[in-house]
């Protein structure tokens, strides 16, 4: 890297530290306003004028640095710097974050992404969007961001809570014990970074089809290595100890699920028994029930799920919802079995016909059931809505196959982003949106608040499913085992941390779906009512699905299933879930 670029990068780092110290000296409200002004200044094109407050050295320094960056790179650095200065205030309820969410914030607005952008700037590396979104590159960048965050944990960072406090709060360690646990986590993440920039680098480079991009990625990985080496050189007391054995992974030991937080209520549809009879007959006609799967089908009680998540829909929609869930259950089991036997799953072929809007006459029971559901579900949908459902189904299958074929240990944040799609929740959210707010413009649901609402809803569903799946001991990728491997904690701690991840997302969902939020979009009374019905449908689904998971045998261990079947068939489901703590 040329000396001039090193000098400019050093100046940028010096400016960031000076800006943080200056904001720290201001009061909370004044500091927030000052950061907002700096971000607004970065969002404006650079002019020839001096800053409006020439007596402010922070503003003057920022103006000087921006003038020294070539225009082709200025926009990228401005965007990265805005992220670095992003305030942590927002819709979420203030709380000490879960360690996994703490790392997620560090990957988003912490020192790691800013350092990675400075490396790219210094080396003049411009990676394509295809390379930047590849799994290997994301794993490399995430490991780098984690190492940079954990190496700098002794620094005062007003935008991020103290790493030791985070682990101490959620693990029950003493402060010294939390420091030791963080050292082990740093060792594991540094070891993973060394693997990705060493033995596994050829596999990462192989994801680049363009030789020029491969060369740039190679230079970039070396630059990231140099940055980490530089951090260790200036902070020798933070030297990385050799990594210990990985986390405990899955164990046969039974774990206890904590009382799960659920702020929403739902009730049961009065026509549940009718739906049970209809769905059982449909599943038998389609050939979804074999000698062994029939018991699992009865234990799962998908009509109960539909009745708890749609208490006011008509009988046809009630049965259709249950039948979609039964098909998703059978599709997931078929995918797990096919990948376990190293066979190519047949389901993508049926989906290929849907993607081309030409559903072929299906041969297997799953394909026949899909064709029937598709015909009945899309008769009144627009072409755009049909296209969205096709894409959601294709993503569901592709992500699930990738999860099953991937090799552990999994990054819990990457796995959660995948499970958001593969668990079927994004498909469900799309169907709910079409049912309750299908007449609203599609652009409305691409706005940041509504996109965050749908993504948060999907993550809540994925985490709930994975908690019950882990307790049942199913040997498939899920977030709880990934948390245990990633943090090196025991299974019960991993369950508690995963439940806290879910609580954090439910709090975020509450804030995004606050009463009157629909008024923020400037809609008329009719459109606002449609949006509010959609939000209420998401709330009812989240509450009903959790109640269904806690009641039925969908993920119950074998010895629990008879008891849970009796409970699901004979109880009125008055069990209440924990309310928001005061």
Image (cartoon, helix red, strand yellow):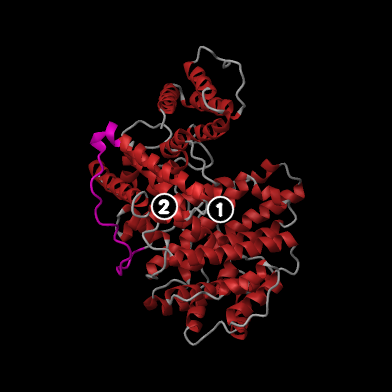
Taking 397 as reference, is 34 above or below it?
Answer: above
Residue 516, percent from left and from top: 65, 44
Confirm whether the magenta stretch covers residue 356. Answer: no
Q: Where, quadrant-wise, is the N terminus in this rendering?
A: top left
> Within the image, what quadrant is residue 162 found in?
top left
What kind of secondary structure does the magenta stretch mostly adopt?
loop
SS at mark 1 in the image: helix
Q: Left or right: 347 with respect to 124?
A: right
Could you tell me which residue is drawn at 39 percent across and 74 percent down?
Answer: 557
SS at mark 2 in the image: helix
Mark positioned earlier in the residue sequence (2 or 1)? 1
Taking 175 as reference, is 156 above or below it?
Answer: above
Residue 499 in sight from this viewpoint: no
Question: Which residue is outermost to the bottom?
Answer: 291
Kindly identify which residue carries mark 1: 455
Could you tell me which residue is drawn at 36 percent across and 59 percent down?
Answer: 409
Kindly identify which numbered label has been placed on residue 500.
2
Could you tell me which residue is drawn at 64 percent across and 44 percent down?
Answer: 517
Q: Left or right: 476 with respect to 286?
A: left
> Within the image, what quadrant is residue 311 found in?
bottom right
Residue 416, percent from left and from top: 47, 56
Q: How crowded is mark 1: few (under 14 residues within 10 Å), some or many (20 or more)?
A: some
Q: Which residues make up the magenta segment?
A: 232-256
């Amino acid at each position: 890297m040329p000396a001039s670029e090193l000098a400019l990068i050093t100046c940028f780092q010096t400016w960031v530290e000076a800006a943080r110290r200056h904001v720290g000296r201001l009061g909370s409200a004044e500091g927030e306003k000052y950061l907002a002004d700096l971000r607004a200044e970065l969002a404006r094109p650079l002019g020839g004028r001096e800053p409006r407050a020439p007596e402010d050295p922070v503003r003057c320094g920022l103006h000087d640095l921006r003038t020294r960056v070539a225009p082709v790179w200025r926009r990228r650095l401005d965007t990265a710097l805005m992220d670095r200065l992003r305030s942590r205030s927002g819709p979420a309820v203030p709380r000490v974050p879960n360690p996994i969410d703490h790392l997620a914030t560090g990957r988003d607005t912490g020192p790691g992404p800013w350092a990675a952008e400075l490396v790219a700037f210094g080396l003049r590396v411009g990676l394509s969007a295809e390379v930047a979104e590849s799994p290997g590159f994301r794993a490399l960048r995430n490991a780098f961001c984690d190492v940079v965050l954990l190496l700098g944990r002794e620094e005062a960072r007003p935008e991020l809570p103290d790493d030791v406090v985070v682990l101490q709060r959620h693990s029950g360690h003493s402060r010294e014990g939390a420091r030791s646990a963080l050292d082990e986590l740093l060792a594991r993440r540094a070891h993973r970074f060394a693997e990705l920039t060493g033995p596994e680098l050829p596999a990462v480079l192989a994801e680049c089809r363009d030789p020029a991009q491969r060369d740039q990625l190679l230079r970039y990985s070396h630059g990231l290595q140099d940055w980490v080496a530089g951090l260790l050189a200036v902070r020798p007391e933070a030297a990385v100890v050799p990594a210990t054995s990985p986390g405990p992974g899955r164990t046969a030991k039974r774990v206890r699920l904590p009382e799960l937080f659920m702020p929403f209520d739902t009730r049961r549809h009065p026509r549940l028994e009718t739906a049970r009879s209809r769905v059982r007959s449909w599943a038998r006609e389609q050939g979804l029930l074999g000698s062994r799967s029939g018991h699992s089908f009865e234990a799962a009680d998908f009509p109960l799920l539909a009745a708890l998540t749609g208490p006011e829909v008509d009988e046809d929609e009630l049965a259709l919802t249950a039948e979609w869930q039964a098909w998703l259950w059978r599709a997931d089991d078929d995918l797990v079995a096919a990948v376990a036997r190293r066979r190519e799953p047949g389901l993508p072929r049926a989906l290929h016909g849907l993607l081309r809007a030409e559903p072929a006459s299906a041969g297997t029971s799953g394909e026949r059931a899909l064709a029937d559901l598709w015909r009945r579900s899309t008769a009144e949908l627009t072409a755009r809505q049909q296209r969205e459902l096709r894409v959601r189904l294709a993503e569901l299958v592709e992500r699930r196959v990738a999860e099953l074929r991937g090799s552990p240990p999994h990054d819990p944040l990457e796995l959660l982003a995948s499970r958001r799609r593969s668990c079927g929740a994004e498909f469900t959210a799309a169907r709910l949106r079409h049912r309750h707010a299908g007449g609203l413009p599609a652009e409305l649901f691409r706005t940041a608040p509504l996109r965050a609402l749908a993504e948060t809803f999907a993550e809540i569903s994925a985490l709930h499913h994975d908690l019950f799946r882990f307790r049942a001991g199913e040997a498939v990728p899920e977030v709880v085992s990934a948390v245990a491997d990633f943090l090196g904690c025991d299974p019960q701690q991993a369950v508690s941390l995963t439940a806290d991840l879910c609580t954090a997302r439910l709090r975020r969902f509450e804030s995004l779906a606050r009463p009157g939020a629909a008024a923020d979009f400037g809609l008329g009374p009719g459109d606002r009512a449609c949006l509010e019905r959609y939000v209420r449908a998401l709330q009812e689904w989240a509450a009903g699905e959790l109640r269904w998971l806690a009641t039925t045998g969908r993920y119950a261990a074998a010895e629990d299933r008879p008891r849970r079947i009796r409970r699901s068939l004979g109880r009125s489901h008055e069990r209440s879930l924990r309310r928001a703590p005061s």
